[in-house]
Image: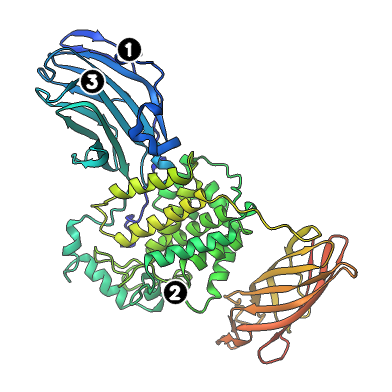
Amino acid sequence: MANRDFHIIHFVVLVAIILSMLACSISLGDQVLLGVEPSLGGESAAVTMSDFPELASFGELAAVHGSPITADVGTKAGTVDLYDGASIQIPAGAFPGSNRLGVTRVDVAFDQIAPDVSQGVFYVVRTEEDVPVLGASIILEVPGFSGDLTVVHYEGGDWVSVSVAQSSTARVSIDHFSKGIWGFFEFWSERDVALGETIDSMDYDSAQARMRLSIEGGGKWVHAFFGVNEQSHQTDKEMCDAIIALLKQYNKPSSRQFPEVQGSTKNLGEFLFAGASPEDVGGPFWEATEDSMEDINDALLTNKDPISPAEFLKIAIDANNGNIPLGVLADHNYLKNITYKGRNAYKPGSGMPREYGEPASRLRSWRQGSNITAAGEYDKMGPIYHIFAAMTGALWLPTRASGQVIAHGEAFLRTFRVGADRPDTPKASADLCGINAAAWLRSHPPEEAAAAPEGKEVTMTGKVTPTGLNPGRKVTKNTFSITFKDDGSGKVRGSGIYASIHLPDECNKELPHSTRWELTGSFDPATRQFSGTLQEFGKGEITLTNCRVIEVEEYLSGDGTWEAVLLDGRITGRIILIPSNGVPVERLTFELE
């Protein structure tokens, strides 16, 4: 299973649709009767969406593509060439006599409200005179598909699905109309394995069964990565509602700004589509969050118990300075990195490297029941990263619509997103969760922040310069961030992370786990001094001189005090940490500019 790239979201931004109108004509035998005309039955050539009330609910997502195509038809056979290779095939005797046929194409930007579906192409086909029954069915032929094609027809005041063969060209048979509307769009869905393998895989002679047995016999990091004996104790809806509740907390203008990333939506699609870890793919959408990967990993590992997708999203948003778009992208990048690298690292009997198994152990399962797919394969990580892959695509892609238009478009897609080839329905529901979370953001503009108290809020970041540590220890990396009011009393917030602590013994080992500390306090403008309290979270391991590894319990929690003075735009001060046993273990001075 580790070498199979079957956990891919096919995002539609990979499909480059070149919008060009071809010269159109109708040929009956060898005679060309009519080319493109500006109107049907004397109507104005300026066709607008108001001419198609059946598509009105799609609002600004819908746009007329080019000019309408009209052609005189009769009893002879012929072909009407439409747009981008589409055509209408007319057999002899289809029409009882002379008539005029008109075709308008309307594009609906479904791809801008859901990342797993293509742009919708709708053909409005009319005749000047009604034809209750055609002498022979005419064929509307539309090429250029590669995903899971869905065809719909507007009939009796509602949209109904039309059964068509799944191929690169759709052929729809029409046997009567005065006016008909047919829509074509395709879903890019998961294909874990062929459906025929689903039942066979439960046979203990199958490759999937042998892989399951190997995983179940593995160590704790193997079990953690693949989710052996794990399941979610929340419903999909509860987990997704928690994500939206978190987004509400961050829904401020400053958190909604998209950073400048030197890449197009096509680049993003290729990045999300790639069957490789984001780090290996590289490019601007990896580089945008690369610096936060270590902080995300450190914060995740400080949790004793597995956390929910919403809690993990909070970690990524905080690691990216409160920015929602970057946080969502960072979640995808971190999780897909762990997922792909872990799968590739695992071979039956080889175990799972801690660097992939331990982060997985801190994440709750998405699947209810077990982490065995309908195809008989273990997969805990796939649905978790799919939430944020789908959310990234839906959030970062440009959109022309909002509010009720988006809601209607998503309801329309949900009606036809049957996913008959999706054996992994939990993963599909994870995709939908990400799409819905992004839709919530699009339909809820950021809330204006409450009026700030007197004084300008200032955020300062820097590196801590540690001194006075216990003999033999040194902090090799320590980041710090503090926010305060530069005049008037105000609350002070701060945080920091120890990256590693060394012991200079013959083992020469590092503290592999980081600890995280947070500051709360106040700023006195009269004295320009800060004061407050500190709490520390997390734990680590230290290798003693005899190379024995022990847990450092004093890092499980810590309370302390701190003070600082602001001088010339520079913060200096000291921190004394007092752990649960009451004996100070660290004494730091820090300096930030």
292 horizontally vs 477: left or right: left
Of residues 35 and 259, the one nearer the viewer is 35
Task: Identify which residue is drawn at 51% across, 63% down.
Answer: 245
Whether residue 117 is situated above or below residue 352 in the rendered picture: above
Task: Identify which residue is drawn at 29% across, 11% down.
Answer: 35
Spatial CA distance of label 1 from label 2 is: 69 Å
Spatial CA distance of label 1 from label 3 is: 13 Å
Query: Which mark sits nearer the N-terminus, 3 or 2?
Result: 3
Which quadrant is home to the N terminus? bottom left
Q: Which residue is mark 3?
A: 127
116 horizontally vs 377: left or right: right
Of residues 399 and 351, the one nearer the viewer is 399
270 horizontally vs 448: left or right: left
Residue that protrudes farthest toward the right in the picture: 526
Tag 3's secondary structure?
A: strand
Tag 2's secondary structure?
A: helix
Residue 576 visible from this viewpoint:
no
Where residue 311 appears, x then y in whole percent?
A: 51, 68
Tag 1's secondary structure?
A: loop
Nearer to us: label 1 or label 2: 1
Query: Which mark sits nearer the N-terminus, 1 or 2?
Result: 1
Q: Which residue is mark 1?
A: 42
10 Å crowding of disc 2: few (<14), some (14-19), many (20+): many
Which quadrant is home to the C terminus? bottom right
**What amino acid type is highlighted by mark number 3?**
Thr
Determine contact: label 3, label 2, CB under 8 Å. no
Q: Which residue is mark 2?
A: 361
